[in-house]
């Protein structure tokens, strides 16, 4: 699709004109297979494909023919595209949903286009590249009544679910704070001075998508984009939704009202190797106010309390004790107090499979567990933590209006501009 057509389409949508079909759900029964289009089929996309083989893969899209080759070979009958816009032009009436596994900066546009046309969406975390993008996708999904799922696949893990059940049972009392972390030092990638042309098999302009034009650099694609602010969201974006899924689920968190961040001096272009943030969540009818701490790197509180955080990523502090947990293990503290503890009765329904529940939702079943209504606020919290670190300060957050109080610098990061030809009006 030409850029002028993209703008024409976006303007019409902004004016309230519906350009897609009223209902594009082709699968008519729970037993009928979905017709899916896969956007981004190398790396994470290839892993997602392995979980989609029970459905019909009818279209595949990727900007890198080499990265996509293995996936293409597995589904020779699927129609191949480089540009997701062309895919929708050609396949709009032939698909039920899309699975999107592209870099963070190119999550929003294909997801938005899909929902415009009434297509169901499975989208990799952290949902999108900016707060505005996350909120827009969350609200648009609800408006269009499409089935959504954010790729927080660990939501099904038994250890994670037990932690949620124990917290909700009241075993450690009222939760006052939760410390969550990813113990990783990845970030600040090397800056290559070598100037090379983009590989002939990589559609570089399409890879850039909505961000400003710049020459190809080997360190951007296929993976280091994650650690450049222009394209990625660092280890916080990479792991935050997986790890914060535990406190969000256990405590019923939604939007923080105050955010604070610190760490090494921020780099204008690259994500950090360490950071520390604090997010305040207001009281609800179900619980009092709670403080969530997010860190890249092991938090100091583990050393202060002489705790081994290996394979763990959350420490809940309650009025009656503490719970240290990860995706596969749960430990109650102090150990002496809980030596005779008997795990509470399971209260969460047995999972049917993370992908299967999205398939079922697409066919008219119950909403998927990480639909955007739940996962959108979680993704926004991850991005707020990044913003707080980048300004090395704190601010009040008006989640209803997407407004920062107390930092003009932070407000500018709520929504980053799209380059000419990629503008979207909502």
Image (spheres, helix red, strand yellow):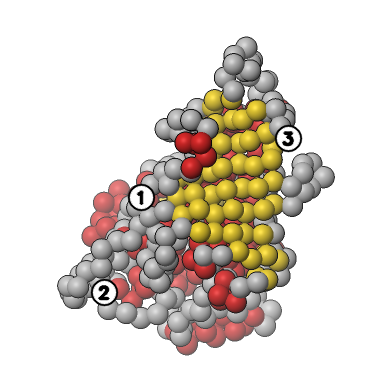
Relative side of 231 to 71, left or right: right
Give me the disc on residue 146. none
Residue 220: x and y in percent read: 30, 66
Q: Earlier in the sequence, mark 1 or mark 3?
A: 3
Q: Earlier in the sequence, mark 3 or mark 2?
A: 3
Q: Secondary structure at mark 3?
A: loop
User: What residue is rendered at 63% in x and 76% in y?
Assistant: 426
Q: Is residue 348 visible?
A: no
Residue tagged 2: 216
Rendered position, 68 above or below 14:
above
Q: CA separation, marks 3 and 2?
A: 52 Å
Instruction: Bin the neighbour count of mark 2 within 10 Å (Cα to Cα): few under 14, some 14-19, many 20 and up.
Output: some
Rendered position, 296 above or below 91:
above
Q: Pick the quarter of the image with the N terminus.
A: bottom left
- Front label number (1 vs 2): 1
Q: CA separation, marks 1 and 2?
A: 26 Å
Instruction: Bin the neighbour count of mark 1 within 10 Å (Cα to Cα): few under 14, some 14-19, many 20 and up.
Output: some
**Looking at the image, which residue sits at the far top?**
340
Residue contact at pointers 3 and 2, CB within 8 angstroms: no
**Looking at the image, which residue sits at the far right?**
285
Q: Nearer the viewer, residue 46 or 257?
A: 257
Rendered position, 383 above or below 306:
below
Res. 400 image quadrant? bottom right
Residue tagged 3: 174
Residue tagged 1: 185
Instruction: Bin the neighbour count of mark 3 within 10 Å (Cα to Cα): few under 14, some 14-19, many 20 and up.
Output: some
Relative side of 169 to 112, left or right: right
Numbered-mark total: 3
């Amino acid at each position: 699709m030409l850029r002028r057509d993209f703008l024409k389409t976006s303007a019409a949508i902004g004016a309230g004109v519906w350009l897609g079909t009223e209902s594009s759900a082709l699968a008519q029964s729970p037993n009928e297979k979905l017709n899916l289009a896969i956007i981004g089929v190398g790396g994470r996309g290839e892993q997602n494909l392995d979980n989609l083989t029970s459905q019909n893969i009818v279209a595949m899209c990727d900007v890198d023919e080499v990265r996509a080759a293995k996936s293409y070979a597995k589904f020779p009958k699927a129609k191949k595209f480089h540009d997701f816009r062309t895919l929708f032009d050609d396949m709009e009436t032939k698909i039920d949903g899309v699975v999107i596994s592209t870099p963070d900066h190119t999550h929003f546009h294909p997801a938005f286009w899909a929902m415009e046309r009434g297509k169901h969406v499975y989208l990799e975390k952290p949902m999108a590249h900016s707060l505005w993008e996350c909120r827009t996708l969350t609200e648009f999904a609800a408006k269009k009544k499409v089935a959504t799922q954010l790729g927080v696949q660990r939501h099904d893990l038994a250890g994670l679910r037990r932690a949620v059940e124990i917290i909700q049972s009241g075993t450690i009392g009222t939760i006052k704070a939760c410390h969550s972390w990813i113990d990783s030092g990845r970030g600040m990638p090397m800056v290559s001075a070598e100037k090379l042309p983009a590989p002939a098999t990589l559609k570089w302009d399409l890879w850039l998508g909505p961000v400003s034009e710049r020459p190809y650099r080997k360190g951007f694609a296929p993976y280091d984009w994650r650690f450049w602010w222009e394209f990625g969201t660092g280890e916080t974006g990479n792991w935050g939704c997986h790890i914060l899924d535990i406190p969000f689920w256990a405590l019923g968190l939604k939007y923080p009202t105050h955010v604070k961040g610190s760490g090494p001096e921020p780099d204008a272009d690259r994500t950090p190797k360490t950071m520390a943030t604090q997010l305040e969540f207001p009281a609800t009818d179900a619980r009092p106010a709670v403080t969530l701490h997010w860190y890249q790197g092991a938090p100091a509180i583990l050393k202060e309390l002489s705790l081994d955080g290996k394979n763990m990523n959350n420490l809940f502090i309650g009025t009656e004790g503490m719970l240290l947990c990860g995706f596969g293990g749960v430990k109650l503290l102090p150990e002496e107090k809980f030596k005779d503890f008997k795990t509470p009765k399971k209260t969460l329904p047995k999972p049917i499979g993370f992908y299967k529940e999205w398939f079922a939702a697409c066919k008219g079943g119950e909403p998927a567990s990480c639909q955007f209504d739940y996962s959108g606020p979680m993704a926004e919290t991850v991005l707020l933590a990044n913003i707080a670190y980048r300004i090395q300060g704190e601010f009040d957050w008006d989640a209803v209006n997407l407004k920062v109080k107390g930092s003009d610098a932070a407000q500018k990061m709520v929504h980053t501009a799209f380059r000419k030809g990629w503008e979207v009006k909502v």
